[in-house]
Amino acid sequence: MTEQTYNQALLELVQAGLAALEQRATNGNTINTATAESHFLCSWMVQALKERRFAKLIANDLTQWISDARSMGAGAQLPSLFNRINDQYSAAQSCAHLGDALQALLTHLEQNDWLVILDAKVDTKLKLASDGRHSLIISAEQYQTRIKEQNIVKPITLYVRANEQLLAQTAAIFGLLISQGDKKSSLIKHHRAYQIFPDNEQPALAILLD
């Protein structure tokens, strides 16, 4: 039996939650306000966590969303969150040849005046003078060895200086999921480190589109 991936577990959760929310809305005399819907989803997730209804892979996400709903109420915007995850991950799941998708993304960025560097050795702390332009660097070693036969075969780190939503929205055009940015692990000053994974199989929640 094939082990469930994080992406599969996440989609299973949000699609089940949205289905439960839709079923609730069809019941008579139901209050369908944002506060009521958020409370319902919070209670639904608490029960799902208690019953271990979904894979451990997403237990941390469930716990965080429950905490957000309890502290923020409707402000947690859980229905919107679930819909965004469903749309973004469903689209990414159907994307094939991620190596080609990455190449198309890099070409698009260059055409939009990004500084894209793919031939630098990145194995120590470095600086880049980009004169205020958005910039993206991939180490030459990773760029040359981790894209094979149109696919990404190992995780690739992108060092990026740009608005995070802009990066995620542009990547989504080409079907790519981007990991959360990490400034501490970045080897390029003023850049954040992001990762893309083979088959879009991020080990944790990717950057979600606003």
Image: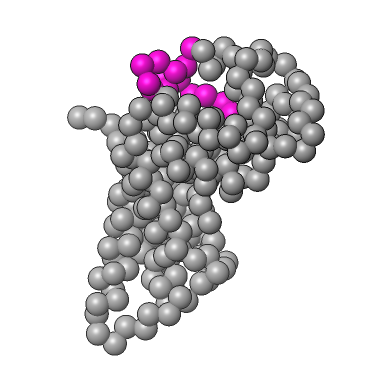
- Confirm whether residue 185 shows in the render: no
Please say which color scheme the image uses. Answer: one colour
- Confirm whether residue 199 shows in the render: yes
Q: Residue 120, image x and y in percent?
A: 66, 15
Quadrant for the N terminus, please: top left
Q: Residue 111, image x and y in percent?
A: 58, 34
Direction left: furthest residue: 1
Q: In this view, does 3 lie above or below 162?
A: above
Residue 154 in the magenta stretch? The answer is yes
Query: With 76 as the anchor, is 159 left or right in this view?
Result: right
Residue 97 in the magenta stretch? The answer is no
Direction front: furthest residue: 111
Residue at x 31% of width, y 55% of height: 15
Q: In this view, does 127 lie above or below 48?
A: above
Q: Which of 200/110 is in front?
A: 110
Q: Which of 194/29 is in front?
A: 194
Residue span colored magenta:
145-158
Query: With 66 as the anchor, is 92 left or right in this view?
Result: left
Q: In this view, does 115 lie above or below 21?
A: above
Q: Residue 185, image x and y in percent?
A: 67, 29
Q: Is residue 119 above or below residue 189?
A: above
Query: With 200 as the anchor, is 125 left or right in this view?
Result: right
Q: Which of 82/72 is in front?
A: 82
Residue at x 53% of width, y 35% of height: 108
Q: Give residue 17's quadrant in the image.
A: bottom left
Residue at x 38% of width, y 80% of height: 32
